[in-house]
Amino acid sequence: MKLPKTKKTPKPLTLATPRLRSLRSKLEALALYGIEGERDNAQRKLGRLVARVDWTAKDAPEAGDILNVAVTRAAVGHPIGEFDCPHVANAVRWAVEQRTGAECYLAGAVILARVTPDSARRLQDVARTIAEGFATTWTRFAGVPGVCPGDRPLFCMGLYDGMMLEQRAAGQRLPSRPHKARPIRAKRGAVDHAPAVNLHPYTLALSLGRSIRFSVHVVTICEQLDRMISGELPAPAA
């Protein structure tokens, strides 16, 4: 005697994430404006993606998101980190306030958050990760020919916007650098100076900031920075 076939329970849809929404936009553009097989391939991928993702629900947090942290607010502030660099301190403070809604304030070089002690300990890990990522990537970038200390605010601004997944509107001008590169006149018999990177510090830092947020190891982030820089530096003369 054959048992009646039971219907398979449909697989639950994956919740949309910012990365999936970005992928959908790219596939939609290729499906409309792609050439030859590119358009057909994009249409197939787009159909599969749309079918397996719930686009109506609130975005699910992406794996490894250090800013996806639940906190319990309190009337008294507790320390979450001490920072020598004001750019790093502001980045930590603004990121925590924006993502958790907990009020933060500075007491000297220490950031205090109005959360419970247990929540403060979790935020200390967040602050430590951000500070390490900002400090290490800047130290690496500062050693590149053509970079000066005045570029640090723009670099940190790019790291912060990338970390918060913020993008400048199309056509919006980049913040100006505090200095302009001056052409160096070679003297007779002088050794040629090292080639300098021309990529804007803000632009360079955007993708690095996103990597900091999503728990990419700082060594890997520095390797990412090295690859970006090596693609911008002109090849040495033969």
Image (cartoon, rainbow, N blue to C red):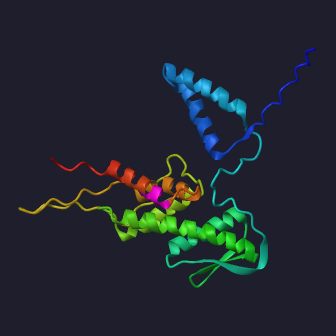
- Relative height, residue 218 to residue 30 (above, below): below
Image: magenta residue range = 218-222
Quarter of the image that includes the N terminus: top right
Residue 162 percent location from the top left of the image: 54, 56
The answer to whether any part of residue 103 appears in the image is no
Residue 210 percent location from the top left of the image: 55, 54
- Relative height, residue 42 to residue 214 (above, below): above
Residue 222 percent location from the top left of the image: 43, 58
Seen from this angle, which residue lies furthest left?
A: 189
Seen from this angle, which residue lies furthest right?
A: 1
Seen from this angle, which residue lies furthest front?
A: 1
- Relative height, residue 88 to residue 69 (above, below): below
Q: Residue at x 40, y 67 (%)?
A: 139
The kind of secondary structure the magenta stretch mainly shows is: helix
Quarter occupied by residue 25: top right
- From the viewer's side, name the closer residue of 135 and 217: 217
Q: Residue at x 68, y 67 (%)?
A: 97
The answer to whether any part of residue 121 appears in the image is yes
Quarter occupied by residue 192: bottom left
Seen from this angle, which residue lies furthest top?
A: 1
Residue 108 percent location from the top left of the image: 58, 85
Q: Residue at x 49, y 56 (%)?
A: 208
Q: Residue at x 63, y 40 (%)?
A: 20
The reply, left or right, for residue 145 in relation to residue 56 is left
The reply, left or right, for residue 151 in relation to residue 16 is left
Quarter occupied by residue 196: bottom left
Residue 59 sits inside the magenta stretch: no
Residue 220 sits inside the magenta stretch: yes
- From the viewer's side, name the closer residue of 4 and 185: 4
- Relative height, residue 215 to residue 51 (above, below): below
The reply, left or right, for residue 26 in relation to residue 9 is left
